[in-house]
Amino acid sequence: MRLTRAFLPTLKETPAEAQIVSHRLMLRAGLIRQTSAGIYTWLPAGWRVLRCVSQIVREEQDRAGAQELLMPTIQSAELWQRSGRYEDYGKEMLRITDRHDRPMLYGPTNEEMITDVFKAYATSYRDLPRNLYHIQWKFRDELRPRFGVMRGREFLMKDAYSFDLTKEGAQHSYRQMLYAYLRTFERMGLKALPMRADTGPIGGNLSHEFIILAETGESQVFYDAELESIDWAGAAFDFDSVADMQACFDLATSRYAATEEMHDEAAWAEVPEARRRQGRGIEVGHIFYFGTKYSEPMGLAVAGPDGQMVVPEMGSYGIGVSRLVAAIIEAHHDEAGIKWPDSVAPWKLAVLNLKPGDPACDALAERLHAAFPDQAVLDDRPERAGVKFADADLMGFPWQAIIGPRGAAAGRVELKRRMSGERMELSLEDALARLAA
């Protein structure tokens, strides 16, 4: 990708409507553009980040045994009337009518639809357990959309739904998803803390939110510092082992962690004072076990091993995929701009040619750019060096390869690591090897 041909519209000034860091930087770095209140176009750089985040989510769901499908955004109101949620959901639901006067809605979630889909095919206990998920756009008509994609009206969400024959099986599925979520967030460079949560309009009696620590978070959180030291991505729990999933669940939930609305002062007092932490947090995921809340009213039942009909136990599991992009920026930025973790960066390398037209500079820049055709951006614009440095920092490329006339004449390249600020001057061969590694 050459910047002279790219559609990467950066802004020098911060738009007045942007109140938090992620919103400001997403607008300035050309990731998104607002089209109406709480609704955004994802520009090429932002779309690439969103795809990286989605892929990590997808890989960890697949690893946990969930199977991907794709459900529509528009749902029949009749499904929600059968579950009893159509009138209860409130004004956040966008209700519409088609040309035949049939009531429809833009889905805010998919419990009813997935239950109806599964019901059409599941007839026996042999069809269980199953966990189905999709990554799809949702719409919730927020009263006051704000903070960019952090609380927009249209958003990309991964929602999964488990079906089990017994309560014990459903709780195993719940623990599998808890572990998958912890791995997912850690792979994105985020430390997510699972916190016991209110079930809200989804329902059920077991629920956990996943909170990313950030100064601009909406939630006040209280937690045991030991939670931050667990390496979930490197953990070796077996998803299919009931004992392993129980051990993982115990490890994740045995230490105190609560949002303000669930905070228990008596339990908090039992945490050793040296380990007590308070801060702000952003919710990026939420999981629920709700038994037969949807399967029973939707008429889902299968024949059990003894021939008797059994109503399957269910759970649902959501990750705010588009919200995660903002959460990553909130966790990884400085005064100059974004600091993308390698796993989610739109491009891994910015090649900064400080003197386009200089034969040595051009040759080095082209070699570096050609070595990473899908992951490098070549800044070949006729701009001052300061402009190129500022834009590279703003957009957050994990690596910058800086090529100036003096270094190029000696066959040398300066590499800068955006996350740490580390700089090193290397030969072209060593620079290529370091970047490839």
Image (cartoon, helix red, strand yellow):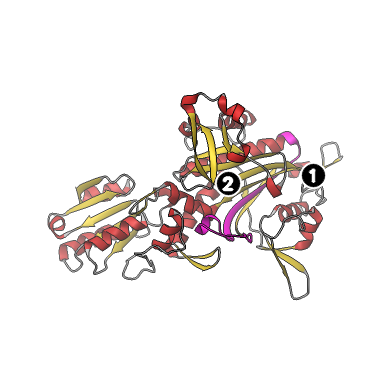
Q: Amino acid at mark 1?
A: Ser
Q: 272 above or below 409?
A: above
Q: Residues within 10 Å of mark 2 (few under 14, many from 20)?
A: many
Quadrant in which the C terminus appears? top left
What amino acid type should be assigned to the residue bearing mark 2? Answer: Gly
From the viewer's side, name the closer residue of 205 and 295: 205
x and y percentages locating residue 127 in the rendered image = 74, 45
Q: Residue at x 76, y 62 (%)?
A: 77
Q: Is residue 46 left or right of residue 406?
A: right
Horizontal and vertical percent position of residue 173: 66, 39
Q: Position of residue 157 (x, y in %)?
A: 58, 54
Q: Residues within 10 Å of mark 1 (few under 14, many from 20)?
A: some
Does the magenta portion include 162? Answer: yes
Left or right position of 124 against 416:
right
First in sequence: mark 2 vs mark 1: 1
Q: Which mark is residue 285?
A: 2
Which picture quadrant has residue 84? Answer: bottom right
Q: Residue at x 52, y 55 (%)?
A: 150
Q: Residue at coordinates 62% horizontally, 54% vertically from top-left?
A: 134
Residue with the mark numbered 1? 124
Based on the picture, tell me whether residue 370 belongs to the magenta stretch: no
Instruction: Quadrant for the N terminus, please.
Output: bottom left
Find numbered disc 1 in the image and state the secondary structure of the residue it sits on: loop
* Residue 413 point in image, percent of width and height: 20, 53
Please tell me the numbered disc located at residue 286: none
The magenta segment is 139-168
Whether tag 2 and tag 1 are in contact, CB under 8 A, the answer is: no
Q: Residue at x 78, y 70 (%)?
A: 102
